[in-house]
Image (cartoon, helix red, strand yellow):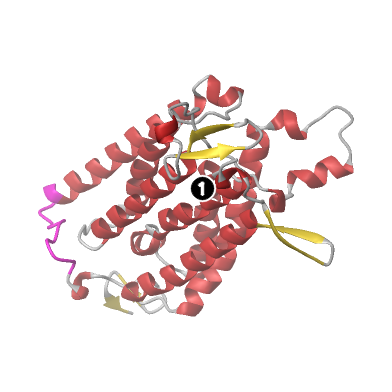
Amino acid sequence: MHWTGKIEPIAFTIFGRDVAWYGIIVTFSMIVGLLGAIQLAKKIKLNSDDILEMFLFAIPFAVLFARLGFVFAHASDFFVKGFDFNDFIQIFAIWDGGLTILTGVPGGVLGAYIWCRWRKVDILRLGDAVLCIVLLCQSIGRWGNFFNQEIYGMPITNESLQFFPMAVYIARQGAFHQATFFYESVLNLLGFLAMYFVSRRLLVRGHSLPLYVFTYGLIRFIMEFFRYNTNVYYEVNVIRIITLVAWLIGGGILAYMIIREKKKGNRVWYKDKIPPKLIKPAKYGIYKEGKTK
């Protein structure tokens, strides 16, 4: 058996509780996201305490929404006949794996919005500064799927292509499959770099959210054509339709925002990077629209 088929999902056991690689990798991705957001938020005058506090608001919402999205997409596996308390606990058993980014990101945005309302922070400026880091976290998080032997693609029967990262050996299938998790990890990394590049040069308040929807919508739309271990929701193309619509809406809104700013006579693109003096603080408590209260 190929080494990719021998990967164990459990990293170690402590106090009788198995600790999965999936959970370790997702946790690591969150730490990377926090540290990256702290650095990126400096340009909008938010400090590490601000970002840590926002993080503590956003992550629980993101995890809850991501888990519920997965549960309802696989409802038949959770809402079984004779549903009891143990089945109810399994709904929230994220340590066993099973999170859906498509619902997790909106949950995180909701948590961030609540914090911004409380702390009087402009969420659009905050998003423009740090939202790109989400794609980096997703890129890292996809490696959790590698250890769980999930998110793989179509079978690969050509022996010359049966090598990693082109393919992974899926033990329960007894065959090589496309390493779709790796493909998406790379695309998410490229998406992060693209969003980071744009965020340092595009001066349009609020551009980050439609840009993220456009970028990740395109990535997921492409990847859904490769996935093999899908359920009925994928088979009827629901996810493909959702991601295609998201891509079109994100791109349309972004184009509209840029055109609107240009019509106002505002410069929207800077070849090198946006001059620091034009980047306004995000926190209203000290500044509002660049003016001291």
Q: Nearer the viewer, residue 14 or 130?
A: 14
- Which residue in the rendered view is the most extreme toward the top? 236
For the stretch drawn in magenta, the main secondary structure is loop
Q: Is residue 89 above or below residue 111?
A: above
Q: Is residue 266 in the magenta section?
A: yes
Q: In the image, what residue occupies the spot 32% across and 47% down?
A: 211
Q: Quadrant of the C terminus?
A: bottom left
Occupied quadrant, residue 45: bottom left
Residue interval drawn in magenta:
262-274
Horizontal relation, residue 142 to residue 274: left or right? right
Q: Quadrant of the N terminus?
A: top right
**Total residue callouts:** 1
Q: Is residue 62 above or below residue 87?
A: below
Horizontal relation, residue 232 to residue 168: left or right? right
Horizontal relation, residue 177 to residue 258: left or right? right
Where is residue 10 shown, x and y percent of the image?
70, 55
- The residue at which mark 1 appears reads as 106
Q: Is residue 106 in the magenta section?
A: no
Q: In the image, what residue occupies the spot 63% across and 33% down?
A: 73
Q: Residues within 10 Å of mark 1 (few under 14, many from 20)?
A: some
Callout 1: SS: helix
Q: Amino acid at mark 1?
A: Pro
Q: In the image, what residue occupies the spot 23% across and 41% down?
A: 256
Where is residue 84 shown, x and y percent of the image?
89, 38
Where is residue 2 shown, x and y percent of the image?
56, 42
